[in-house]
Amino acid sequence: MADRATMPDARDRAQRLIHAFDRAFDYLGVVAFLGMIVVLCLQIFFRYILAAPLVWATPLSMFLFIWAIWFGGASGIRDQTQVRVELAERYLPHGIQRLLMPGISLACALFLVIVIYKSFEVVELQASAIYDTLPFTRDYLFMVVPVLGSVMVLQALRVFVRQIGQYYFPDRDG
């Protein structure tokens, strides 16, 4: 009986931890996006007001933009707000949805696993490519794919589990 009493407490702690990771990834995406905006505003100011453009602003803003997109993609998959065709969710019968929707989530996860696998070669190729104006190599730009792609896979699997609960165990709490 003691094990059952601790299960909700352990589940609550796990949910709090997952929620903290979700918030951290959301905040990191916001920080990357705001960093890009700050860098671009500095570039505009230095280029057009001071007539002394910053040589590092364009590659750094591109770097931050790409990372912000992937952070946003992970959040979008988690919340199921990514760009998608909602035809199945709106018009197909429930019996078809209960097969199709979890299947789409698994297909998404599988596609991301393939993208991550293929990205390691790109990261390795970019390890020797240096930016002329930034103090790091281009592999840091491409590391976004295996790092945040892995997070996206986990988010897609979370959605899959949530959909299984929604379609196959609708009366169950939690």
Image (cartoon, rainbow, N blue to C red):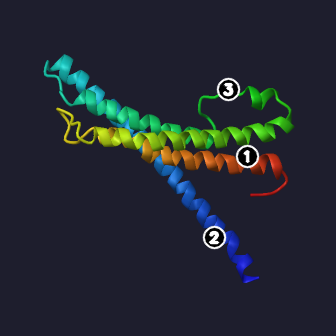
Type of amino acid at the residue the image marks with label 1 = Gln
Viewer-side residue, 16 vs 93: 93
Residue at the bottom extreme, as displayed: 2
Disc with the residue nearer the chain's start (1 vs 2): 2
- Mark number displayed over residue 85: 3
Distance from disc 1 to disc 2, alpha carbons, whole Å, reads 23 Å
Dot 1 falls on a residue whose secondary structure is: helix
Is residue 71 shown to the viewer in this render?
Answer: no
The quarter holding residue 111 reads: top right
Can you identify the residue that label 2 sits on? 10
**Residue type pointed to by label 3:** Val
Tell me residue 2's x, y (percent).
Answer: 72, 83
SS for tag 3? loop
- Image point (65%, 71%), residue name: 9
Answer whether labels 2 and 3 touch (C-beta < 8 Å).
no
- The answer to whether residue 79 of the structure is visible from this angle is yes
Earlier-in-chain disc, 3 versus 1: 3
Q: Mark 1 points at which residue?
A: 163
